[in-house]
Image (cartoon, rainbow, N blue to C red):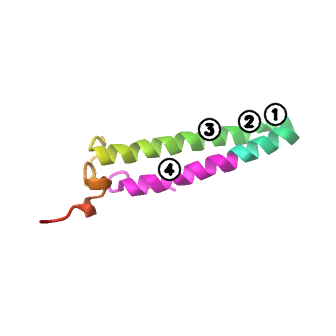
Amino acid sequence: MSINARTATAADFDNIAQRHANAFWGWLITSVITWYFLHWWLLVPATLSLWSMTSSVSSSMMAKKLRDGTYKIPNPNNGAPDGDANNIKSS
C-alpha cells in the first residue's frame, strides 16, 4: 500500500511499517520452507523478505522524522505533537 508523503501522519507511517514487518516474517518463514525443499529457489522469498525488512525500517524512520520535525517533504504534520497536526490543542 502506498501513502501520500505530503499529507501522511506519523501513525500512517507506523501502520505501513507494521504491515511490512508482518510481511517480513511471512517471507522469512516461506524462505526457510523453500530452502528445505527447493534449495536455490530460496533466493526469491529471501529477496522479498529483505525488501520487506528494509521498507519497514524506512517507514519507521519517516514516522520518527515527522515526530521530530525533520521530515524533508513539505507536510503539515511535520513537527506536530506525535506527528499529527490534528493533535494540536487550541488554548
- Mark 4 = which residue? 17
Category of crowding for the residue at label 2, using alpha-carbon neighbours closer than 10 angstroms: few (below 14), some (14–19), many (at least 20)? few
- Mark 1 = which residue? 40
The residues tagged by marks 3 and 2 sit, at their Cα atoms, a distance apart of: 10 Å
Is residue 58 among the parts visible in the rendering?
yes
Q: Position of residue 5 (x, y in %)?
A: 37, 51
What residue type is disc 4 on? Ala
User: Residue 50: which numbered mark, if any?
Assistant: 3
Left or right position of 53 against 58: right
What residue type is disc 2 on? Leu
What residue type is disc 3 on? Leu
Q: Nearer the viewer, mark 3 or mark 2?
A: 3
Residue in the image at 52% along x and 45% along y: 56
Find the magenta span and give its range.
1-27
Q: Position of residue 49 (x, y in %)?
A: 65, 42
Q: Position of residue 16 (x, y in %)?
A: 49, 54
Q: From this viewpoint, which residue is outermost toward the top?
A: 40
Q: Are marks 3 and 4 in contact (CB under 8 Å)?
A: no
- Residue 36 lies, with reference to residue 85, above or below; the image says above
The residues tagged by marks 1 and 2 sit, at their Cα atoms, a distance apart of: 6 Å
- Residue 80 lies, with reference to residue 31, above or below; the image says below
Category of crowding for the residue at label 1, using alpha-carbon neighbours closer than 10 angstroms: few (below 14), some (14–19), many (at least 20)? few
Q: Mark 3 or mark 4: name the one nearer the start of the chain.
A: 4
Q: Nearer the viewer, mark 1 or mark 3?
A: 3
Residue in the image at 62% along x and 51% along y: 23
- Residue 1 lies, with reference to residue 54, above or below; the image says below
What residue type is disc 1 on? Trp
The residues tagged by marks 4 and 2 sit, at their Cα atoms, a distance apart of: 23 Å
Q: Are marks 1 and 2 in contact (CB under 8 Å)?
A: yes
Name the element at disc 2: helix
Residue in the image at 81% along x and 42% along y: 34
